[in-house]
Image: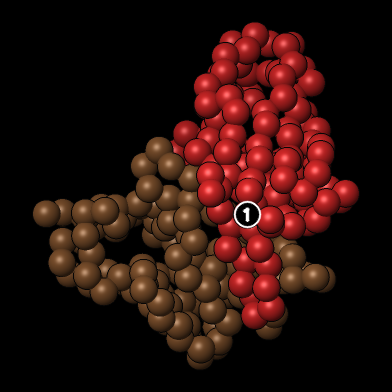
Chain colours: A red, B brown
Amino acid sequence: NAGVTQTPKFQVLKTGQSMTLQCAQDMNHNSMYWYRQDPGMGLRLIYYSASEGTTDKGEVPNGYNVSRLNKREFSLRLESAAPSQTSVYFCASSVSLAGGYNEQFFGPGTRLTVL
Amino acid sequence: DAKTTQPNSMESNEEEPVHLPCNHSTISGTDYIHWYRQLPSQGPEYVIHGLTSNVNNRMASLAIAEDRKSSTLILHRATLRDAAVYYCILFLQGSSNTGKLIFGQGTTLQVKP
């Protein structure tokens, strides 16, 4: 099993360009998440999808859109990139069980620079 | 979302126990306490979680105060590989057992040989 995979690993954009970050998981998890992590900071939740067909905003959704394409794939789109969106983006998926169990499995991250 | 407070950094010697504290004075009765850690240049990984009782697993132990306003992650014998940022997170389990994690700043643990 590959776990959670993200593409691309690195990306440089110019201000105003658009791009889509791809994420896929092969663990049959219902829930998927997108986070960003700025240097020296903790992760901040952008959007999440509790199940196929649903998406919800997290802490910092402005400037982003998401698509839960199917159970495996959850993409993050930047319509008009800005330098403030320079960050490392992590995708995660989880299985949620009773008793508060919500282990999230993270991908390797995408390092995005917006010039 | 309820918040947690952790020290910015801690140091430990290799092979010694490490106690990582977390304060969560505004915790609600249904919030679970989760711990994740992030090794350098990697995504976070799950460590342990609990509600009221102390918990043990192969990675660590979680000690939860009786009033639940604080908790402590215990690494019994620190190794160099345990050098990471440790996040204490309150998790509210919603319908269908789903929910979201809100990460704070975490504690950077340095382990000295």
Name the side, left or right, on which B26 lies relative to B9: right
| Coordinates of residue B29 in the picture (x, y in percent) | 68, 83
Numbered marks: total? 1
Closer to the camera, B37 or A2? A2
The reply to whether residue B106 is visible in this rendering is: no
Mark 1 element type: loop
Quadrant, the C terminus of chain A: top right
What's the amino acid at mark 1? Met
Closer to the camera, B62 or A22? A22
Q: Chain of mark 1?
A: A
For image coordinates 63% across by 54% down, the residue present is A27
Quadrant in which residue A7 is drawn: top right
Asked if residue A35 is positioned above or below residue A112 in the image, the reply reads: below
Closer to the camera, A97 or A35? A97
| Coordinates of residue B41 in the picture (x, y in percent) | 40, 38
Name the side, left or right, on which B99 lies relative to B113: right
Quadrant in which residue B75 is drawn: bottom left
Outermost residue, right direction?
A: A53
To which residue does mark 1 refer? A27
The reply to whether residue B91 is visible in this rendering is: yes
Asked if residue A27 is positioned above or below residue A38 in the image, the reply reads: below
Outermost residue, front direction?
A: A1
For image coordinates 53% across by 26% down, the residue present is A9
For image coordinates 54% across by 79% down, the residue present is B50
| Coordinates of residue A21 in the picture (x, y in percent) | 67, 28
Name the side, left or right, on which A79 lies relative to A104: right
Q: Residues within 10 Å of mark 1 (few under 14, many from 20)?
A: some
| Coordinates of residue A4 in the picture (x, y in percent) | 58, 44
